[in-house]
């Protein structure tokens, strides 16, 4: 649904700018909010602040030439006064202190505060965000009015997602998407909330009902600098004004610290794979835990204990991390007022998410598993799950992304060496780094290269693994998951691990492979 309403500027900005400036806003209406000068049109409010790479004021003159009515700005810029002098006689220019962190709230007003009429569930953590979000949406869809999704695989509804390329989009698009989803009749929205999104204020102005924490592992230090900064960014979600409940993984050390801290101001539901949770009694107000976990070839049989009942059910998912994800979903469904019986029943019907432990299996051939695992902890979890469900050798094909946290590269190698029988180190998304240089850093983490092979070309690496693996073996393709391209420099080259795997499995079956 498109929104073409004109909104009073003084209403949008009241409380966000100096009172003395509000008088200048009287009798001015705005027909859209934009931060991209290429999208600027007549009657728009152009928002200009310091971004990650550049400052919006550098593009203000172009936006004014395209007819914007107002420029809302903040931040230091060497030629700031020169730019403002050149446009202030053409449009109203208003300074807004700390604008980056106010954009979301301003946009919320423009879009009629859509999150206030939705049950908005925010999911954060290093691993598991996408799976938890999509499992929740599947379960809520089964028993209630449609549930919207915002996250890594796209925004929209579970069967109609529109890719964005980001886990958490910018503040304007967050609010517009919430408005569109609310207008389409949804009552629930599940949103993956990244550390970048929290740090940059992209979800400011969203009225979260429940915040979910999955785990904490080393990631994104290229952006945050330190693990403490990364953790602090994640923590912000749990201090959202008006938050009703927190659902937190108590099997995670940081999760336990977080739970104890936020319990002072919010109701905490803790979830755990441990049968005995007495050691966690000071972490949460309510507990959801597994009292029995039994693996079978394509899933788990679970017995669970919750404040709303105890019961048994099967989940058609691989990996103990997915048992943990299922408990997070169960707790959140109970917080969202689904009955215990409906919550359990909906979990028995969940299906794996694109590129998350996605199985490609046919008889008399090795099983291929495609997963997005790109951290030490993520790779460890998926490798361990392969041991639990399959008896053959584990082949692990993985690489590390360029222009990203370099310190995790040898750590990924140590995990692969610990759990896999055969390892092929290959190219992931090199971006602006030399693939061989990335691989060289990965190789420093191995204690022995006896079972390690280096194959720069990812397609060839997948070919070698599938060709040489035996029936009963598992070929794990880790790191890219749902992605359908490989990023080399600034170019996105079509590449899908799943498609390539199916191609080589088919060739193997027909006997065309040597």
Image: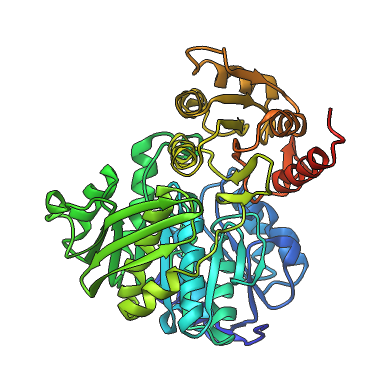
Query: Measured along the vertical axis of the image, is residue 216 above or below residue 158?
Result: above
Image coordinates of residue 176 in percent, x first then y, are: 58, 74
Q: Is residue 35 visible?
A: yes
Q: Is residue 301 left or right of residue 291?
A: right
Q: Along the line of sight, which residue is nearer the eye, 150 or 207? A: 150
Question: Can you say which quadrant of the picture contains the N terminus?
Answer: bottom right
Q: Is residue 447 left or right of residue 267?
A: right
Image coordinates of residue 476 in percent, x first then y, are: 59, 38
Image coordinates of residue 377 in percent, x first then y, are: 43, 38
Image coordinates of residue 294 in percent, x first then y, are: 36, 52
Q: Residue at left 54%, top 74%?
A: 148
Q: Is residue 113 visible?
A: no
Question: Can you say which quadrant of the picture contains the C terminus?
Answer: top right
Q: Along the line of sight, which residue is nearer the eye, 25 or 141? A: 141
Q: Residue at left 60%, top 44%?
A: 369
Q: Residue at left 50%, top 84%?
A: 112
Q: Along the line of sight, which residue is nearer the eye, 481 or 77? A: 481
Q: Is residue 254 left or right of residue 125?
A: left
């Amino acid at each position: 649904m498109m929104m073409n309403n004109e909104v009073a500027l003084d209403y949008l900005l009241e409380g966000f700018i100096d009172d003395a400036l509000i008088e200048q806003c009287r009798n001015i209406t705005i027909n859209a909010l934009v931060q991209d000068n290429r999208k600027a049109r007549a009657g728009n409010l152009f928002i200009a602040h310091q971004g990650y790479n550049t400052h919006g004021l550098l593009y203000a003159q172009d936006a004014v030439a395209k007819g914007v009515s107002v420029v809302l700005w903040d931040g230091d810029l060497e030629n700031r006064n020169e730019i403002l002098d050149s446009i202030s006689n053409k449009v109203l220019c208003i300074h807004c202190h700390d604008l980056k962190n106010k954009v979301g709230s301003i946009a919320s007003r423009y879009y009629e505060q859509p999150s206030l009429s939705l049950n908005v569930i925010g999911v954060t953590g290093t691993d598991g965000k996408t799976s938890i979000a999509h499992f929740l949406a599947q379960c809520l869809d089964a028993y209630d009015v449609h549930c919207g999704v915002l996250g890594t695989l796209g925004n929209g509804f579970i069967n109609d997602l529109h890719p964005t390329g980001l886990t958490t989009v910018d503040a304007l698009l967050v609010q517009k998407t919430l408005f569109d989803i609310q207008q389409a009749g949804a009552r629930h929205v599940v949103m993956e909330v990244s550390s970048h999104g929290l740090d940059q204020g992209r979800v400011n102005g969203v009225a979260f009902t429940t915040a979910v924490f999955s785990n904490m592992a080393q990631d994104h230090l290229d952006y945050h600098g330190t693990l403490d900064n990364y953790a602090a960014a994640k923590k912000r979600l749990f201090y959202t004004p008006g938050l009703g409940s927190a659902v937190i993984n108590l099997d995670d050390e940081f999760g336990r610290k977080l739970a104890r801290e936020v319990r002072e101001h919010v109701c905490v539901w803790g979830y755990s794979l441990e049968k005995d949770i007495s050691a966690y009694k000071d972490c949460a107000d309510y507990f959801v835990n597994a009292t029995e976990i039994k693996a079978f070839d394509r899933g788990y049989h679970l017995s669970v204990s919750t404040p709303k009942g105890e019961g048994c059910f099967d989940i058609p998912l691989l990996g103990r991390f997915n048992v943990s994800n299922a408990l997070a979903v169960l707790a959140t469904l109970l917080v969202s007022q689904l009955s215990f019986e409906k919550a359990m029943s909906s979990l028995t019907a969940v299906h794996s998410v694109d590129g998350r432990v996605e199985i490609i299996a046919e008889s008399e051939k090795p099983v291929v598993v495609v997963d997005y695992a790109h951290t030490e902890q993520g790779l460890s979890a998926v490798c361990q799950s392969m041991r639990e469900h399959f008896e053959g050798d584990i082949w692990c094909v993985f690489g590390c992304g360029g222009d990203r946290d370099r310190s995790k590269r040898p750590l990924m190698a140590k995990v692969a060496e610990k759990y896999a029988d055969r390892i092929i180190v290959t190219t992931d998304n090199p971006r602006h780094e030399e693939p061989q240089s990335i691989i060289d850093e990965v190789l420093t983490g191995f204690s022995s290269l006896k079972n390690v092979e280096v194959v720069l070309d990812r397609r060839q690496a997948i070919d070698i693994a599938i060709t040489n693996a035996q029936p009963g073996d598992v070929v794990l393709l880790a790191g890219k998951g749902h992605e359908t391209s490989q990023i080399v420099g600034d170019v996105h080259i079509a590449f899908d691990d799943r498609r390539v795997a199916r191609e080589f499995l088919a060739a193997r079956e027909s006997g065309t492979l040597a």
